[in-house]
């Protein structure tokens, strides 16, 4: 029963991968090795596609693997397998939080967790900046400060920043759509 | 029933507009969940993110379950989660079925290079907003700096930072409480 196996493998991936979507990657390699549903190089393609489509990366990967293995139903089964452990664990924690919200230890923990959470998001933001605005590899090759920054990107970032301050009511999706168009028109991926 | 539909479509919209991981979802969550619908506060979003870092599963999914559960109980949690994964199912299935070498297409590469720049700015704005409600004194500033700088410069797991921060929070709060008595 391959559907059951798909569900089970992705349930495991969902249960044991903690943190971001790419944390599921080692599990996918394991699935590839033990089941032969897809090759390692196919997996690399799937990662690239998952990163260049909307939606959480882990979910995209599950859908892709499920679809290549067993069509649309396979995609649904793998994705539901991946999210089932999260749903169960979070529902339990949410119930616990409701009951202990006013406990002083829980309150103290959140007093420390909130700045930490903001810190982790800051770090995630820095890593996107390093990918999209800084050209560290090129800078190391040429040694020229001029090559350190992706100037087109930097200019776009400043323009978007100013626009988000002027048009506060605009939905973030508008800026994302506009940036995609600018990226295509000005060939952002090329050097 | 209407509220459940609302949950589903709101999270479907958030899932379909999130490019690149759970943290990129934050600006969408702030707009759709905090500002437009009052389903959660900025503080609660931070709590969910911190908990999502050290519980199994994908952060985007965990956050959806939390917000859904808070709004409409267990069914709400499930519906919101199904909503957040729905666009992925549709989009990835279409790409896998019909488009070869999607990620190598020049137009896709260029569009995403542009989108990533935008994501930088959106995350920056989101962080500025969160700082106002999370960094409220010297102790929280210290925790923020340790975690932010630590996770940029080292490869220490976020779980360690989250556990450290929770322990520091408990100690600091209770010490402050004891000092003021």
Image (cartoon, coloured by chain):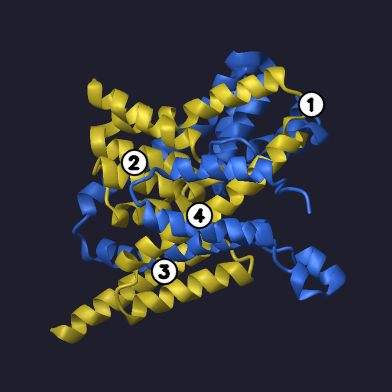
Mark 1 vs mark 2: in front? 2
Query: How many angstroms separate mark 1 from mark 4 (CA)?
Result: 45 Å
Q: Which residue is mark 2?
A: B32
Give the chain ID for the yellow colour. B
Q: Which mark is residue A36?
A: 1
Query: How many angstroms separate mark 4 from mark 3 (CA)?
Result: 33 Å
What residue do we see at 31% from left, 23% from top? Answer: B5
Q: Classify residue B80 by image quadrant.
A: top left
> Few, some or many C-alpha atoms within 10 Å of disc 1 (few <14, some 14-19, many ≥20)?
few
What residue do we see at 59% from left, 39% from top? Answer: A57
Q: Position of residue A81 (x, y in %)?
A: 53, 28
Q: Which one is nearer the viewer's eye here, A26 or A115? A: A115
In the image, residue A25 above or below residue B155? above
Q: Are marks 1 and 4 on the same chain?
A: yes
Residue A10 in the figure: left or right of residue B10: right
Mark 4 vs mark 3: in front? 4
For numbered disc 2, what is the local secondary structure?
helix
For numbered disc 4, what is the local secondary structure?
helix
Give the chain ID for the blue colour. A
The disc, 3 or 2, on the residue closer to the chain's N-terminal end is 2
Query: How many angstroms separate mark 3 from mark 2 (CA)?
Result: 28 Å
Mark 2 vs mark 4: in front? 4
For numbered disc 3, what is the local secondary structure?
helix
Q: Which mark is residue A160?
A: 4
Numbered disc 4: what chain?
A
Q: Which residue is mark 3?
A: B165
In the image, residue A70 above or below residue B133? above
C-beta proximity under 8 Å, tags 1 and 2: no
Quadrant of the snapshot with the C terminus of chain B: bottom left
């Amino acid at each position: 029963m391959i559907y059951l196996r798909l569900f089970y493998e992705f349930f495991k991936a969902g249960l044991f991968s903690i943190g971001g979507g790419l944390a599921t990657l080692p599990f996918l390699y394991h699935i590839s090795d033990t089941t032969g549903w897809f090759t390692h190089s196919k997996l690399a393609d799937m990662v690239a596609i998952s990163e260049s489509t909307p939606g959480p990366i882990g979910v995209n990967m599950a859908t892709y693997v499920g679809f290549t293995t067993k069509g649309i139903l396979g995609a649904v089964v793998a994705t539901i397998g991946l999210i089932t452990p999260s749903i169960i664990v979070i529902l339990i924690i949410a119930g616990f939080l409701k009951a202990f919200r006013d406990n002083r230890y829980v309150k103290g923990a959140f007093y420390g967790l909130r700045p930490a959470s903001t810190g982790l998001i800051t770090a995630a933001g820095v890593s996107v900046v390093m990918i999209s605005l800084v050209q560290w590899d090129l800078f190391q090759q040429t040694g020229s400060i001029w090559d350190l920054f992706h100037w087109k990107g930097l200019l776009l970032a400043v323009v978007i920043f100013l626009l988000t301050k002027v048009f506060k009511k605009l939905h973030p999706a508008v800026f994302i759509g506009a940036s995609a168009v600018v990226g295509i028109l000005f060939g952002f991926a090329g050097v | 029933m209407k509220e459940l539909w609302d949950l589903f479509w709101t999270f479907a919209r958030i899932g379909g507009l999130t490019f690149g991981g759970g943290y990129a979802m934050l600006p969408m969550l702030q707009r759709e969940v905090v500002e437009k619908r009052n389903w959660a506060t900025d503080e609660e979003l931070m709590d969910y993110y911190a908990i999502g870092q050290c519980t199994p599963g994908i952060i985007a999914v965990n956050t959806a379950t939390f917000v859904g559960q808070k709004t409409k109980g267990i069914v709400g949690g499930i519906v919101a989660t199904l909503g957040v994964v729905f666009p992925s199912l549709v989009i990835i299935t279409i790409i896998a079925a019909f488009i070869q070498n999607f990620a190598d297409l020049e137009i896709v590469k260029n569009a995403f290079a542009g989108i990533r720049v935008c994501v930088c700015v959106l995350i920056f704005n989101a962080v500025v907003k969160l700082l106002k409600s999370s960094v409220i004194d010297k102790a929280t500033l210290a925790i923020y700096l340790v975690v932010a700088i630590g996770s940029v410069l080292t490869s220490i797991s976020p779980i360690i930072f989250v556990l450290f921060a929770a322990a520091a929070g408990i100690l600091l709060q209770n010490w402050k409480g004891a000092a003021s008595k």
